[in-house]
Amino acid sequence: MGITTGIIMGSQSDWATMKEAADILDELGVGYETRIVSAHRTPDRLWEYGRTAVDRGLKVIIAGAGGAAHLPGMMASKTRVPVIGVPVQTRALSGVDSLYSILQMPRGYPVATMAIGAAGAANAGLMAAQMLAMNDADLAARVDAWRAALTASIPEEPRDE
Ligand code: RP5
């Protein structure tokens, strides 16, 4: 299983959220790597990661950050590998700051922005898998099975809990 997906995040503190993406990729058998790459604290690391992403065989990058969340956008400016952005929930502004920072990219450098927080990170993993599945029939079958299992798990009627 080669590494096709990069999961990058601005800080160790983002890992609890970004692990949701990693868990999905584990479930679906997608090879990935994880790195802390901060737009503000390690800009040279960001640049190097983006500069080498295509040559290293990455097909998609999931980038999570919070607050002034420049990581996904800066990564998108440095590589044509598609970037999926995850706005990490923040204490000060509940992640709306992260969301707007990631979402409002200028024309020419898109970031596929997910929802704030854990659901967004999990969906980023699913989105990456679905993109990769376009050229991988075995992965496509696993994604289809994952989706069918989710559907099957939803009860028709609510019950007292
Ligand atoms: C961002 O600042 C990170 O993505 C993180 O969400 C936020 C806070 O970072 P720490 O102060 O917890 O390292 O760069």
Image (spheres, grey):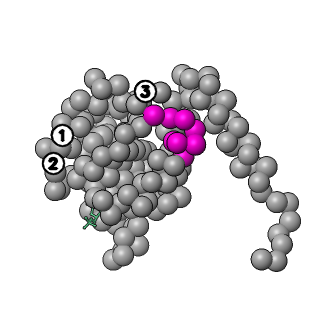
Q: Nearer the viewer, residue 130 or 1?
A: 1
Q: Nearer the viewer, residue 118 or 83?
A: 118
Cα gap from disc 1 to disc 2, whole angstroms: 6 Å
Amino acid on which disc 1 is placed:
Trp
- Residue 130: mark in rendering: none
Prevailing secondary structure of the magenta residues: helix
Nearest to N terminus: mark 1 or mark 3: 3
Q: What is the tally of numbered marks visible in this picture?
A: 3
Give how far across and how far down residue 119 sits, in percent. 53, 58
- Residue 80 picture quarter: top left
Q: Nearer the viewer, residue 110 or 106?
A: 110
Q: Which residue does the image show at 30% across and 46% down from the upper left?
A: 35
- Magenta span: 24-31
Nearest to N terminus: mark 3 or mark 2: 3
Q: Badge 3 local density, few (<14 within 10 Å), some, or many (20+)?
A: few
Where is the C terminus found, in terms of image quarters? Answer: bottom right
Residue hosting label 3? 2
- Residue 47: mark in rendering: 1
Q: Is residue 36 placed above or below 54 in the rendered structure?
A: below
- Residue 100 picture quarter: bottom left
* SS state under label 2: helix
Q: Is residue 69 visible?
A: no
Residue hosting label 2? 43
Left or right of 56 in this view: 88: right
Q: Which residue does the image show at 28% across and 58% down from the upper left?
A: 11
| Identity of the residue furthest to the right in this view | 157
* SS state under label 1: helix
User: Is the C-beta separation of discs 1 and 2 under 8 Å?
Assistant: yes
